[in-house]
Image (cartoon, rainbow, N blue to C red):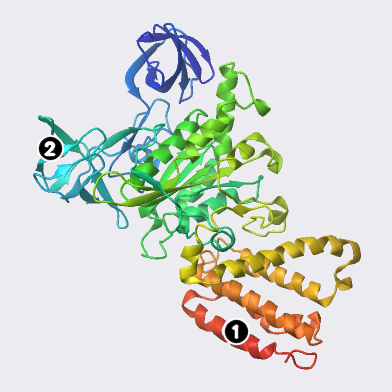
Amino acid sequence: MGKIWRITGPVIVAEGMRGSQVNEVVEIGSEGLVGEIISLDSDRAVIQAHEDTLGLQAGEEVRGTGSILTAELGPGIVGAIYDGLQKSLTALMANGDVFLRRGVKSFALPRDKKWQFTPTVKVGDKVSEGTIIGTVPETGLIVHKIMIPQGISGTIKKISEGQFTVVEPVALVEQDGETKEIIMMQKWPIKKPRPYKKRLPTTRLLVTGMRILDYMFPLALGGKAAIPGGFGTGKTVTQQQLVRWSQTQINIYVGCGERGNEMADVLYSFKELKDPNSGRLLAEKEVFLANTSNMPVVAREASIFVGITLAEYFRDMGYDVLLVADSTSRWAEAMREIGGRLEEMPGEEGFPAYMGSRLSSFYERAGQVECIGSPDRMGSVTIVGAVSPPGADFSEPVTQNTLRIVDALYALDTSLANKRHFPAISWLQSYSLYVDSVKEWWSKIAPDWAEIRASALRILQLEAELEEIVRLVGPEALPERDKLTLMVARMLREDFLMQSAYHPVDTYTTPQRAQLMVKTIMRFNTLAQQLIESGGTINELRQSPIVPRISRMKDIPNEDFEQRVKELTNDMETGLIPQKGGVR
């Protein structure tokens, strides 16, 4: 036990701390504020407080807990709402705490709730780390798999079926002549990656329902991506769409330093939204970490690492997990603030020199892996982090350090947002290194996906080049073929890439539907080129009833889509056949 010697905002220096360890969690003052030791010098410890230090005084007690910052893992996580330190905000609200009081304590997992445990192994079976010994139906969408904790292996001596709390033993394992109790809850250090057998290549598409991502710039399961963008470009809505509709078993949303009203909107909407496959509430597969901008800055780092630890835990069960962090820039700003108070040598724009390695330690925990233990299974963690560069300047340090780590960039363009083109993802700046990885996956749905995608991107690129000429001489000075390129590019932009997050049909698009949409537009381009070569004009094409029908494809209900697009294609084939210089 030590005493406070100096207080500088969230940084506290305590003396009399001999015997403490770096990263040890401490309780500060009479309220027991949570803090973490970040450096030791003789008997003095430098502590970063994860809660507001207003009102603390020199001389108050600092008590070491002997443990490092850990996450509680077990049944009760899915559907929960946590703060940055994994305090259950749901439990605190149930106790009548409208506001999060300083120093308040709350278990991440309920200790009194009983769960139905069904064994999957029997007495006498050999088990090791990561072996699944039973299941718990946590929600209507998630079966929680109870695994043997790290450091335990041996023979099952006893295992019971029935209802248990997370702290009651469900099995006994004999290891080296010693009997160990197995409970349904584990604890894991948040900054230590969970182990796995082998990292696997990323070959499966993460289906997000967003056409520009799934079709143009695909993200593989187990991949890592960044969404940088200035204020008002739609980072939060884009990430909310990912959490809502991504075809993963578990989605984790980390609100790291974002505005409270945005987080409240996310939590409110998930009470009503339903999973498109099962029809059940999406909240039954979601986990929320709410560390808003008015909460202590130091807890932002903890929230990021708590989120990735939860993701790895569900990955080890064999699930595909999506983690969305909004935004890592707020975490970097917290690092800069703490670094300044610690009088560390600043790096570029005042950020600490170790910012790049901290970001890497987070993003590199993504991946598709072969899990340890039995039965054999494969799981993945996909990370999508938002970046908020000041003034939409992508050359600032957080964005540049992030781009060195991720393999997919979804660059949000302020000019597109100003034109009300959403999602405002720039097709000229964005890229994905997973195109070749998911080509085989796409070939099962659309064998010509790679060719059609390349052709569509080529048209969009040509449009950007022609815009320079249009600014000088006007569009009417262009030859008919170039006018057609601008027309088809506009179709791709407005009828395919533009997607409404609030339209009941357009909010989610299956890969099969996206393929039909692009294929229809590109078929129109081929037929229109034939028409122009036979003497037709772009004005005749603009007057064709086919054009508005293409623009309304995105609104066609899913159950009628295939038939309606087939009819549209047939009408195109007959209506755009060259007719001596006109459109029939």
Q: Residue at x 80, y 86 (%)?
A: 536
Q: Mark 2 highlights which residue?
A: 172
**How many residues crowd mark 1 within 10 Å: few (<14), some (14–19), many (20+)?**
some
Residue 556 location in percent, x, y? 54, 76
Residue 490 location in percent, x, y? 71, 69
| Whether residue 31 can be seen here | no
For residue 179, side relative to residue 105 (left or right): left
Q: Label 2 sits on what residue type? A: Leu
Q: Is residue 6 above or below residue 439?
A: above
Q: Nearer the viewer, residue 461 or 115?
A: 461
For residue 539, side relative to residue 218 (left or right): right
Q: Label 1 sits on what residue type? A: Leu
Q: Nearer the viewer, residue 381 or 107?
A: 381
Q: Nearer the viewer, residue 92 or 28?
A: 28
Decide which of tag 1 and tag 2 comes sooner along the chain.
2
Q: Is residue 540 above or below residue 495?
A: below
For residue 295, side relative to residue 547 (left or right): left
